[in-house]
Image (cartoon, helix red, strand yellow):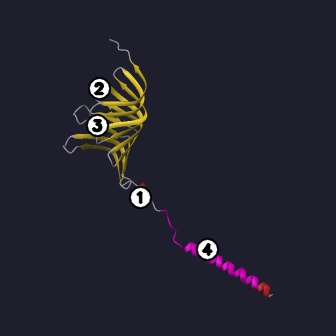
Amino acid sequence: MNRLYGLATIVFLFAALSYSIIEWRASQPVETDAIDTDLTPDFIAETLKSDIFSETGKLSYAIDASRMEHYSDLEVTYFELPEYTLYPKNNESPWKISAKEGTLYNNNRVMLENRVLLQATDENSLIQKIQGKSLELDLNTNIISSEQTILIQGKGFTMYGSGLIVDLNTKQMTLTEHVQTIYKKNDS
């Protein structure tokens, strides 16, 4: 019977040890996953309208957006349906640029994506519209650039290409790769 008592004692000790471990683990506080504060915006604005002025007091640009989320730790601001009105430094007519999404970085560069449209407000401007998947805007210099395929519509022509740089202050445009230009016949 010694063997039977020895085996029963070992089973009892194993059961007690298992029970103790289970109870000890159950009594430990459950660690919940902490919310990553980098992914939580510092503030959110709905129906944003903001005018930004230069150091001399002139209107530099205006922004309208349906929603804005600012993340100070990431140093970025996200926009939904942003529309910028850009005022060139030479007091020329403003330009409007809009997109479905926009990201403003801390160096005043904006990456606009998804159905981007740059439009002249001056009806006499040679270039009326520039469309693309994405355009990058430098708010300090009013220079717009893109490596993507773009469509340029102007008075009497439509141009396709890629690699665009536009300086709104000087109205200078550079197209790296010209694909095609279609001229419209004037009915005069």
Residue 37's tag is 1
Q: Earlier in the sequence, mark 1 or mark 4?
A: 4
The prevailing secondary structure element of the residues shown in magenta is: helix
The amino acid pointed to by label 3 is Leu
The reply to whether dot 2 and dot 1 touch (C-beta < 8 Å) is no
Residue 125's tag is 2
Q: Residue 172's spot in the image, x, y percent?
A: 30, 30
Judged from the image, the secondary structure of the residue bearing numbered disc 3 is strand
Instruction: Give the answer, above or below, for where 16 lies relative to 53.
Output: below
Q: Is residue 62 left or right of residue 102?
A: left
For disc 4, the marked residue is: 22
Q: Which is more foreground, mark 3 or mark 4?
A: 3
Q: Which is more foreground, mark 2 or mark 1?
A: 2
- Residue at the limit of the structure toward the right, as seen here: 1
Q: Residue 156's spot in the image, x, y percent?
A: 35, 20
**Residue span colored magenta:** 6-33
Q: Earlier in the sequence, mark 1 or mark 3?
A: 1
Most foreground residue, 181 or 98: 181
State the separation of the CA atoms marked 2 and 1. Answer: 47 Å
The reply to whether dot 2 and dot 4 touch (C-beta < 8 Å) is no
Judged from the image, the secondary structure of the residue bearing numbered disc 1 is helix
Q: Is residue 15 left or right of residue 129?
A: right
The amino acid pointed to by label 2 is Ser
The amino acid pointed to by label 1 is Thr
State the separation of the CA atoms marked 2 and 3. Answer: 15 Å
